[in-house]
Image (spheres, rainbow, N blue to C red):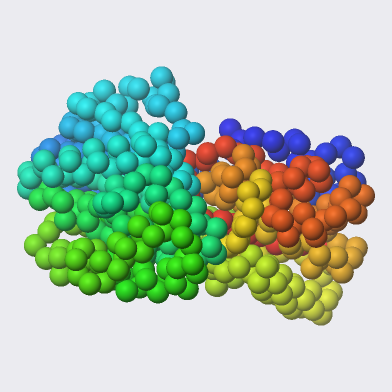
């Protein structure tokens, strides 16, 4: 079953035959990639249960299931991780299942209800992303109270994926949900990195920065799908069960670095007061390594940030492509990262073209991959996303490639790019010709971050998947065929 829902729209009839062939080939392989990075495939590879001995084996670690089992799944992949995990555990009984998924997700489908029959209690929350909502707070408070009620005879599996920072939150007083929403939007628009954003999030939360783990005497096993380039467990979902190396002083430095100090909004002033109190020691720090002594806590990464890259390389290599991965993740400003990405791609391409010429070979299919989450500093509300903007900013840099096919794609592996309904975009040498015909004020629109508007006008470029149930940051790819 295709994950990319609009494959036919991406391959218009009016395209020249070779281009249509190339596009279809590439997009079909990208669709196959989505299947390979689905949580169902990944969890089944990593987790094995022996129902006779009541033991579960995860990445060379073994845990006893002959106790009270609770499962808490949080993040963009929450529903698919939960469904897969409880299916693997069956028929082991489960006391509690909590699923905290994005508000666009639905309750479990009727044909999957059979998988949940061995669970005594199910709580399902449609939380907010990228901004937390009331259900984000209700979910966090429910889980916090649950954890406090458990003891050493309980085993809690926490299934954690990207997006959990917004989906799961209980702010410390006096911050309210409205305050939290304003602060989160301000952080997202500031151009701050995910580590910087999460450093502030952790210091205004009752559950992040390891605080959830300290709230219970139960054994905790957290299974993590990483969307963070260095797989830092303290940053993924803001690390609810991981020790936090950041401090209130770090949060203050970030606060001032991005000029929050000049914002007189009540929410920002409350945030500043909380940070200052924390720096004085009036508010406890986040959990540190020494706080975890004597606790039974295991944080296991079952899918790394690089998993999507690894799978992409495998799929394209298997289909006759020369595949190369750029070592550095793209996490900076979109304009600079586009320049760096294209420069690296063209350098790599030229090297291989020279090699092919020497060997007198005339066919070359090369795919150059990178992962990351570029930052876009948005001042006004517009429709778009960082992946869409990335592809558009690549176009002017590639106009000098003549007589060969090239393409660029940028896709959010969770299926959601910014505030649009799209996962990302696919543009190629045919797109540049359409651009000159259809869009006269391209650079102005782009600088206003109206990427969805540009791509809708351009046509046949926007990739639609819906929520994929997975999340490994964004995949950026340059394709070249000679």
- Direction from residue 141 to residue 342 in the image, left or right: right
Where the N terminus falls, by quadrant? top right
Q: Is residue 423 above or below residue 244?
A: above
Rendering coords of residue 164 (x, y %): 38, 48
- Direction from residue 169 to residue 482 in the image, left or right: right
- Direction from residue 347 to residue 163 in the image, left or right: left
Rendering coords of residue 153 (x, y %): 7, 44
**Residue 378 figure quarter:** bottom right
Rendering coords of residue 138 (x, y %): 30, 37
Q: Is residue 196 above or below residue 115?
A: below
**Residue 284 figure quarter:** bottom left
Foreground of the two, 99 or 20 = 99
Q: Residue 259: in sight, yes or no? A: yes
Rendering coords of residue 160 (x, y %): 34, 49
Residue depicted at x 48% and y 47% = 130
Tally of marks: 0
Foreground of the two, 17 or 336 = 336
- Direction from residue 282 to residue 443 in the image, left or right: right
Residue depicted at x 62% and y 39% = 421
Q: Is residue 337 above or below residue 84?
A: below
Where the C terminus falls, by quadrant? bottom right
Determine the residue located farthest toward the top in the rendered image.
Answer: 110
Foreground of the two, 253 or 482 = 253
Q: Residue 222: in sight, yes or no? A: no
Residue depicted at x 44% and y 72% = 256
Residue depicted at x 55% and y 58% = 189
């Amino acid at each position: 079953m295709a994950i990319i829902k609009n494959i036919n729209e991406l391959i218009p009839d009016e395209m020249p035959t070779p281009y249509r062939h190339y596009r279809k080939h590439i997009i079909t392989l990208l669709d196959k990639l989505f299947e390979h990075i689905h949580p169902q495939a990944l969890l089944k590879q990593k987790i094995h249960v022996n129902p006779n001995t009541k033991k579960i084996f995860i990445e060379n670690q073994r845990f006893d299931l002959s106790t009270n089992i609770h499962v808490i799944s949080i993040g963009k992949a929450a529903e698919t991780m939960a469904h897969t995990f409880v299916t693997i555990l069956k028929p082991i009984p489960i006391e509690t299942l909590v699923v905290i998924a994005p508000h666009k997700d639905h309750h479990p489908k009727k044909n999957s209800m059979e998988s949940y029959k061995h669970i005594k209690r199910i709580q399902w929350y449609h939380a907010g992303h990228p901004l937390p909502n009331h259900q984000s707070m209700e979910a966090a408070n429910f889980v916090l109270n649950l954890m406090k009620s458990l003891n050493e005879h309980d085993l809690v599996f926490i299934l954690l994926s990207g997006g959990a920072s917004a989906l799961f939150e209980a702010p410390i007083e006096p911050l309210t949900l409205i305050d939290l929403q304003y602060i989160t939007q301000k952080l997202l628009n500031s151009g701050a990195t995910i580590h910087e954003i999460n450093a502030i999030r952790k210091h205004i939360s009752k559950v992040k920065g390891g605080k959830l783990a300290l709230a219970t005497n139960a054994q905790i096993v957290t299974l993590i799908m990483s969307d963070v380039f260095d797989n830092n467990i303290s940053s993924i979902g803001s690390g609810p069960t991981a020790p936090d190396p950041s401090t209130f002083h770090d949060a203050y430095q970030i606060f001032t670095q991005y000029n929050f100090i000049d914002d007189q909004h009540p929410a920002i002033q409350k945030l500043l007061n909380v940070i200052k109190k924390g720096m004085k020691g009036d508010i406890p720090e986040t959990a540190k390594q020494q706080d975890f002594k004597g606790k039974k806590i295991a944080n296991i990464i079952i899918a790394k940030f690089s998993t999507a890259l690894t799978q992409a390389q495998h799929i394209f290599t298997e289909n006759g492509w020369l595949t190369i991965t750029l070592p550095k993740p793209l996490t900076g400003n979109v304009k600079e990262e586009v320049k760096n990405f294209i420069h690296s791609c063209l350098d790599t391409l030229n090297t291989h073209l020279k090699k092919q010429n020497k060997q007198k070979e005339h066919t070359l299919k090369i795919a150059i991959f990178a992962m990351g989450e570029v930052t876009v500093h948005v001042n006004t509300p517009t429709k778009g996303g960082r992946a869409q903007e990335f592809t558009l900013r690549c176009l002017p840099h590639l106009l000098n490639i003549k007589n060969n096919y090239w393409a660029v794609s940028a896709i959010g592996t969770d299926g959601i790019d910014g505030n649009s309904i799209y996962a990302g975009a696919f543009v190629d040498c045919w797109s540049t010709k359409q651009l000159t015909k259809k869009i006269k004020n391209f650079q102005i629109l782009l600088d206003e971050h109206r990427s969805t508007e540009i791509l809708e006008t351009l046509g046949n470029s926007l990739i639609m998947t819906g929520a994929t149930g997975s999340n490994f940051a964004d995949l950026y790819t340059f394709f070249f065929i000679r």
